[in-house]
Amino acid sequence: MSLKGADMLMFTPVGKRNVIKMSGKSTDPSFSGMVLPVSREISGDSFSAEWLVSSINRGYPQAFMGSKPLYSYSESRVGTKFLTSSGNYQLSDRTLKYAILVIVLTFISVFFSEIVAHRPIHILQYLLIGLALVLFYVLMFSLSEHVSFGLAYILAAIMIITMIGLYILGALKSRKFAAIVSGVLTVIYLYVYVLLNLESYALLSGAIGLFIVLSVVMYISLKIKWK
């Protein structure tokens, strides 16, 4: 059988003697299930594996009586999971997990600009900025279906940063604060993009980055005269 998929391919051995052979195109196959393959080979972007499972090794017998046997067939499955961490949908899903971070930091930078510039921003304007930030993910998802994820991310980021920067310019009447907010957004999107391309150190880099960002925000808040 020739199949296409991006998640996993599992088999349940119901025969007395089961020989399962699998080969395909994947750079990161993860062999899983009740037993590991007796032989496997990974070379470049392809792999091959072979499982040998006997009815003696399973958690259910070859034959039994009764219409509803109390046996779990799923526990005996063997197969391969495909770890496509660099695919467009996987990267898009990981990007969405940083959405709260991007939105909160953007609102903080806008709020600080509002306090320093002494020009109040209406709650409706905050809502419109939030909608623009959400629109980034819609643009990125739609563009990534036609171009590479990196290009889709860059194009969506440029569009949203330009939109919010021009909006802040119109709201605060200050090129300085519009440039500051646009710069903060640029740094945030670049930081998230770097995290997306990290695998082993993504969590550590994210934690250190958040610590630095929170320290900077706390320091800046000390410099603001709230009254």
Image: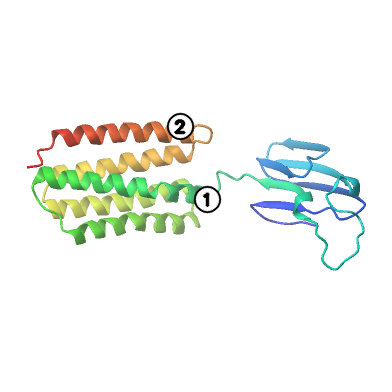
Quadrant in the picture for residue 129: bottom left
Color scheme of the displayed model: rainbow
In terms of secondary structure, where does tag 2 sit? helix
Relative to residue 146, is residue 162 drawn left or right?
left
* Chain-order first, disc 1 or disc 2: 1
> What is the quadrant of the N terminus in the image?
bottom right
Q: Which mark is residue 130?
A: none
**Three-letter amino acid code at disc 2?**
Leu
Q: Are marks 1 and 2 in contact (CB under 8 Å)?
A: no
**Three-letter amino acid code at disc 1?**
Asn
Question: Residue 141: percent from the left, percent from the top?
Answer: 45, 56
Work out which residue is located at the far bottom of the displayed protein and give it.
67
Relative to residue 13, is residue 189 drawn left or right?
left
Residue beneath the point at 85% across and 68% down: 67
Residue 90 or residue 139, whichever sits in front: 90
Regarding residue 148, the answer to whether it shows in the image is no
Regarding residue 159, the answer to whether it shows in the image is yes
Question: Residue 16: percent from the left, percent from the top?
Answer: 93, 52
Residue beneath the point at 20% across and 43% down: 179
Q: Residues within 10 Å of mark 2 (few under 14, many from 20)?
A: few
Looking at the image, is mark 1 or mark 2 nearer the viewer?
2
> What is the quadrant of the C terminus in the image?
top left
> Which residue is identified by label 1?
88
> Which residue is identified by label 2?
204
In terms of secondary structure, where does tag 1 sit? helix
Question: Residue 100: percent from the left, percent from the top?
Answer: 36, 49
Question: Residue 5: percent from the left, percent from the top?
Answer: 67, 55
Residue beneath the point at 64% across and 52% down: 6
Q: CA distance from mark 1 to mark 2?
A: 23 Å
Residue beneath the point at 49% across and 53% down: 147
